[in-house]
Amino acid sequence: MARFASGAVVASSGDNAVLSTCVYRNSSSDLFAGPDFVPLLVDFKQSAAAVGKIPTNYLRRELGQTDADILSSRLIDRSLRPLFPAGWINETQIVVKPLSMDDECDMVMMGLNAAAAALHLSSVPFRGPVGAVRVGLINDTLVVNPTRSAMKNSCLDLLLAGCGDRRTVMIDMDGKEVVKDEIEAAIDVGLEAIDKIMEGMNELRDAGGRKKEEELGKDVLKSIDCENPAIIQAIFRNITKKSIRSLFSKFLKHFLYKRMRMFSELILETNKRCDGRGLSDIRPITINIDVFKRLHGSSLFQRGQTQVISTVTFDSPAAAFHSDSISQILGSQRKKMFMLHYEFPSYATNEISSTRGVNRRELGHGALAEKALKHVIPSDFPYTVRLACQVLESNGSSSMASVCGGSLALLDAGVPISASVAGVAIGLVTDSEANRPHKVLTDILGIEDYAGDMDFKIAGSSRGFTAMQLDIKIPGLTREQLNEAFIKGRIGLDHVLSKMAVLRDRPRGEFKATVPVMESMRLDTYKRQILFRSGGLHAKTVEVETGVKISQEDDAHIGLFAPNKERLNDAKALISKVLAEDDEPMYVFGQMISAEVVELLERGAMLKLPGAGRPIFVPNSQLHSNPIRHSSASGLQARF
């Protein structure tokens, strides 16, 4: 399949199958990109046909990537990008498309492994193979690649990608306050399973792989003398020529590489960072809560030059996120009572850009912060909660600042979270050329993320970790490097949590006066029929006139959701008025009553009960013990 592609693989498991293709072209994508930039684009897109469904939109076709598709694309990208060779400037695209899947299939893991295999088979000088697994912790037992139904009972969701020599390439973790030992054990189990996957990829490569292109040697980059003005002048005179543009690209990459190495040398030699901090020092933290009184909850969290304002909004359960039928089959959450939305405007870094829609970065950072906080919110909390985190200033780790600010905003709103949650970003500086010891950094700056080798975002409470995301630029982390990052992450979290606890360590005692009011109102069955008959006319009238939302809870109760207490009382009064105008008497089963015959019809009679507002219809079968063809045969007479 897809034989024109540079690399193509169909991965299958049972009745599930996914196609992954790799295509590249020999062209320089961006001359001014950094030395670590790889022009890689990954597109993962679910297929309704793969699950036997027709899309429910008006065109009945897949219109674009969903949020889940974008997050899956980012996950695959982060697993493959570190193993591209230095100096690779050819545009590369990987497309992952499910062909067939059932309810239990983990298509993200299958697609990631298929994409890695396609790269491994292609002529791209990819330093693979790479394997990936999902590890769950179910009933205190580590399970590799569990089914979707089994994952519902797991307290750990670890997505792990690894390469040769038991090196870790990517981590994406979501857990219910999981401790360090459990995560390390899950990584060990996952890497053991990854070894078997990579063996299969190597066998596939030996059987039908294409010849790899040669990597750009380090001696080529070093041969360009940055101090020779004659070479620089010659390059600028002939920049329009394709061959010279390629040389100019290599020159720029070498120039930036030299500057970045100077940055790393400072850390490796002096254990001091560019802002004067030590390796484990955290920037000064400033916190404000209840920033705006009318908001249901708010906080302003500042760490160094990174500033985030977080706001909490409560709404009715009807406002919860509901996915469509196809997304439900594909594994998306059916109902979501807590959602976190992350916004990174251009002014946060003094830049100008378009503000149309949510980009991939915002979506990914928001999903990470949401995972960090969702497990500490009680499942029986009555309100739908939306947490909006807007970055006002950014110089590193804005997503982890959103976790800290979001946790404080939830406490300010009065949400009874089980524990405060903080986040910190851990960095890494290595020197493979001189073989010097690596350095692990706590709370990295933006330039340390750009010039360093790792951005390891770690979030958690005092009891354990709730979310992790590992991005690296080197071909895998050793166990020693990963363990040191865990330790420094734990120490950093404890420091930030202690700062947060000084200002607020428990939820607000009672909700603010601006918080909507919810109440359950008892309503007999026949009265419910009055309120919701004729397409819910009376209920809609109450909602329009008072602004109170009415929902049906069970057979005996309705739910009222009002902006405030006054509106709630107005709605209750209006409901009572509507029911009184069309009230029906209460009768006991077996009770004998006299009724007035209003009209005799062919199939029955219209009777008016004492105190009733409207006549009721009684069929012929209830009017006489014997079968009759017309209600007049029952002996009843109507009053005119």
Image (spheres, rainbow, N blue to C red):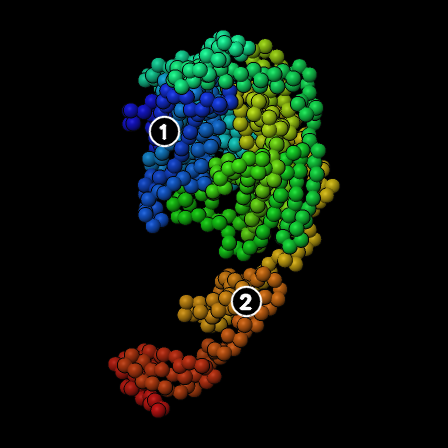
Q: What residue type is labelled 1?
A: Ser
| Crowding near the residue tagged with mark 2, few <14, some 14–19, many ≥20 C-alpha atoms within 10 Å | some
In the drawing, does residue 199 fall left or right of residue 275?
Answer: left
One can see residue 543 in this view: yes
In the drawing, does residue 68 fall left or right of residue 56?
Answer: right
Choose between 274 and 116: the one closer to the eye.
274
The residue at which mark 1 appears reads as 20
Q: What residue type is labelled 2?
A: Thr
Location of residue 107 in the rendering, given as x and y in whole percent from the top left corner:
40, 34
Q: Which quadrant is the C terminus positioned in?
A: bottom left
Location of residue 629 in the rendering, given as x and y in whole percent from the top left corner:
25, 81
Are the residues at dot 1 and dot 2 in contact (C-beta closer than 8 Å)? no
User: What residue lies at 35% left-to-right and 42% top-to-bottom?
Assistant: 62
User: What residue lies at 52% left-to-right and 29% top-to-bottom?
Assistant: 171
User: What residue lies at 32% left-to-right and 47% top-to-bottom?
Assistant: 60
**Total number of numbered discs in the rendering:** 2
Note whether 517 is above or below 578 in the view shown.
Answer: above
Mark 1 / mark 2, whichever is N-terminal: 1
SS class of the residue under badge 2? Answer: helix
User: What residue lies at 29% left-to-right and 79% top-to-bottom?
Assistant: 603
Mark 1 vs mark 2, CA separation in Å: 55 Å
Q: Which quadrant is the N terminus positioned in?
A: top left
Choose between 125 and 186: the one closer to the eye.
125
Location of residue 288 in the rendering, given as x and y in whole percent from the top left corner:
69, 44
The residue at which mark 2 appears reads as 546
